[in-house]
Image (cartoon, rainbow, N blue to C red):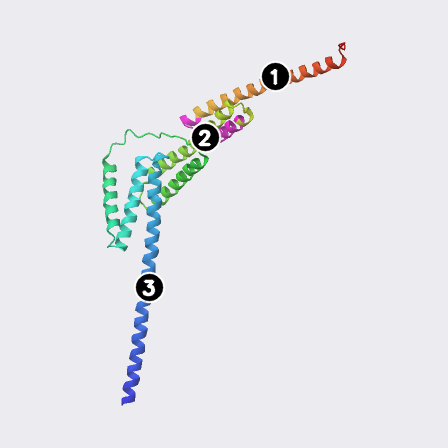
């Protein structure tokens, strides 16, 4: 009888051990999933905040700004659910919701796509990267049903034109600088790159047609300058050759 009780006790302890181990493993999996989800939302939060802060370099339309604020709110809400005791997250969530409410009621009629190009090449690259990331985020939010299709079409087109403007205006700016320094060959290359970008654009709106006309006129002017320069160079070369011949076959001076 005693032996039977011992066997039952051992079996019971083994079962309890297995159950405790399973519970611990389950808790560990839940904790790992929470950490992974929290990390995912934090990355989304940081990306959204970075894009919103980048509005100093890349003009953001009201629709894009509201989309990013909603994305920040969504990320913060998820993080607060995962970390209910994090008071700083809840405070940031309240501030962002207030900003979003203000953005929804503000007057956006004065918004313009004012673009200021930096002189630093790395800053230009960062601007282009920022626009590409914005377009990716816009499509992602549309896939999740957070942005209307019409808004996506309009904003993606606007960002595409903005990206084109940065490319074209930077090439023109470099071309003008090279031309002012007398580097006509380099200037022509920059303006040709600008013209290629404009010609390959799917949009043929006012900006593209106007800039195309201006760039073509500038290229024609540069071609004229290069032709005149070549003519002057040939004239100087011929003058020098004639002078050398005169010095060689002309009458010798007596000393």
Crowd class of label 1 (few under 14; some 14 to 19; many from 20; radius 10 Å): few
- In the rendered image, the quadrant that contains the N terminus is bottom left
| Residue 170: mark in rendering | 2
Question: Above or below — where is 72 with respect to 238?
Answer: below
Residue closest to the eye, 178 or 96? 178
Crowd class of label 2 (few under 14; some 14 to 19; many from 20; radius 10 Å): many
Question: Above or below — where is 115 with respect to 143?
Answer: above
Q: Position of residue 61 (x, y in %)?
A: 32, 35
Does residue 94 appear left or right of residue 180 in this picture?
A: left
At horizontal 32% and vertical 69% (from top left) the residue drawn is 22
Crowd class of label 3 (few under 14; some 14 to 19; many from 20; radius 10 Å): few
Q: First in sequence: mark 2 or mark 3?
A: 3
Closer to the eye: label 1 or 3: 1
Q: First in sequence: mark 2 or mark 1?
A: 2
Does residue 164 appear left or right of residue 188 in this picture?
A: left
To which residue does mark 1 refer?
A: 232
Q: Which residues are magenta?
A: 187-208
| Residue 136: mark in rendering | none
Q: Position of residue 62 (x, y in %)?
A: 30, 35
Q: Does the magenta portion include 85?
A: no
Q: Label 3, secondary structure: give it.
A: helix
Question: Above or below — where is 160 with respect to 75?
Answer: above
Distance from the alpha carbon under mark 1 to that under mark 3: 82 Å
Closer to the eye: label 2 or 1: 1
- In the rendered image, the quadrant that contains the C terminus is top right
Q: How many marks?
A: 3
Asked whether residue 55 appears in the rendered view, the answer is yes
Distance from the alpha carbon under mark 2 to that under mark 3: 53 Å
To which residue does mark 3 refer?
A: 28
């Amino acid at each position: 009888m005693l032996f039977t009780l011992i066997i039952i006790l051992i079996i019971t302890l083994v079962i309890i051990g297995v159950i405790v181990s399973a519970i611990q493993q389950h808790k560990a999996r839940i904790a790992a999933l929470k950490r992974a989800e929290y990390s995912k939302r934090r990355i989304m939060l940081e990306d959204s905040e970075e894009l919103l802060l980048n509005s100093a370099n890349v003009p953001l339309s009201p629709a894009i700004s509201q989309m990013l604020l909603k994305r920040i709110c969504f990320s913060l809400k998820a993080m607060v659910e995962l970390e209910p005791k994090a008071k700083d997250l809840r405070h940031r969530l309240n501030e962002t919701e207030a900003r979003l409410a203000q953005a929804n009621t503000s007057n956006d009629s004065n918004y313009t796509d004012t673009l200021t190009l930096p002189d630093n090449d790395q800053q230009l690259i960062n601007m282009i990267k920022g626009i590409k990331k914005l377009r990716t985020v816009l499509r992602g939010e549309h896939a999740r049903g957070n942005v209307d299709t019409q808004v996506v079409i309009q904003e993606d087109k606007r960002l595409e034109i903005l990206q084109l403007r940065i490319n074209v205006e930077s090439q023109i700016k470099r071309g003008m600088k090279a031309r002012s320094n007398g580097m006509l060959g380099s200037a022509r290359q920059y303006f040709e790159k600008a013209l290629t970008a404009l010609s390959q654009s799917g949009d043929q709106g006012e900006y593209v047609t106007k800039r195309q006309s201006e760039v073509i006129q500038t290229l024609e002017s540069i071609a004229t300058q290069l032709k005149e320069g070549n003519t002057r160079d040939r004239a100087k070369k011929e003058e020098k050759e004639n002078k050398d011949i005169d010095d060689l076959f002309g009458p010798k001076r007596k000393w």
